[in-house]
Image (tube, rainbow, N blue to C red):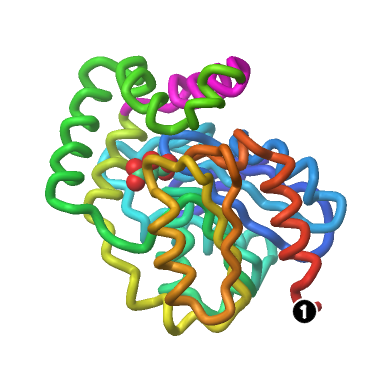
Amino acid sequence: MRKVTRGIEIAYEDAGRGRPVVLLHGFPFNRSLWREQVESLSATCRVITPDLRGHGETTVVAELATMEEMAEDLAALLDELGVGRAVVGGLSMGGYVALAFLRAHPERVGALIFADTRPQADTDEARRTREETARRALADGMEPIADAMLPKLLAHATRVQRPEVVARVREMILGTNPQGAAAALRGMAVRRDQTDLLPGIGVPTLILVGSEDAVTPPSDSEAMNAKIKGSRLVKIEGAGHVSNVERPGEFNRALAEFLGGLPT
Ligand code: MLT
């Protein structure tokens, strides 16, 4: 499905009926990241999965794609879909966007799901690496980016035992437009520290992390969990950074239990 808003075309899936649940993909992926979650949750919820700007089939805007811009794209999409308040979840960069959305539109957030993400801003070194990666993507395309990222994204066991998962994640990366990727890298590099938001979160919050996540390690999720009142942390054993794809069964069970326990 497609909606034109804020001068771009946003591609998204809108599956199932019931409580609206938004799931935001990480970098440099697209909404197909959530395939197993859409299949499982759409039996009981309305699952909305957009392609963030510059990714998937959503318009590529070549300049900077900040987390705030992506959060405003989501707000506009939800307006178009007639959704006021939703459960808002995101994996990694999707979590950065969920935090930006929470800051801008707290009244629209009924519950939160943070998967393999963190609230803090980049270090100076991380910013430099992002800029180098952005230039590399623009000069050489996504192949070298996929080669560099894959060993970090997936747990060792996934890499050796699940070639279909490796191929799927690689394909998502290769399918991302280099200009969209560069814009998002530059957007992530300038994202603000959102840690101060955490103690004020008053909605149910689920935090998930792969026990082998090497990009946003479990210690980041533990620190988030300690700062959010009443949040629940679930470690997905044996999964890396893309925990929902690496271990969809465990991930979906945790989501279903969390969503089933929310007040109506
Ligand atoms: C992601 O998975 O969205 C990215 O790896 C996040 C990041 O680079 O900070």
User: Residue at position x 28%, y 66% from top?
Assistant: 193
State which quarter of the image contains the C terminus.
Answer: bottom right
User: Residue at position x 21%, y 23% from top?
Assistant: 136
Check the image and name the residue furthest to the right: 43
Q: Determine if the magenta segment contains residue 129.
A: no
User: Residue at position x 39%, y 36% from top?
Assistant: 60
**Relative image position of residue 59 (x, y in whole percent):** 45, 37
Q: Magenta residues?
A: 162-178
Q: Secondary structure at mark 1?
A: loop
The amino acid type, in three-letter code, at marker 1 is Pro
**Relative image position of residue 109 (x, y in whole percent):** 58, 73
User: Residue at position x 39%, y 57% from top?
Assistant: 219
Residue highlighted by disc 1: 263
- Residue 128 occupies quadrant: top left
Our reading of the magenta stretch's main secondary structure is: helix
Q: Is residue 213 shown left or right of residue 37?
A: left
Q: Is residue 246 shown left or right of residue 156?
A: right
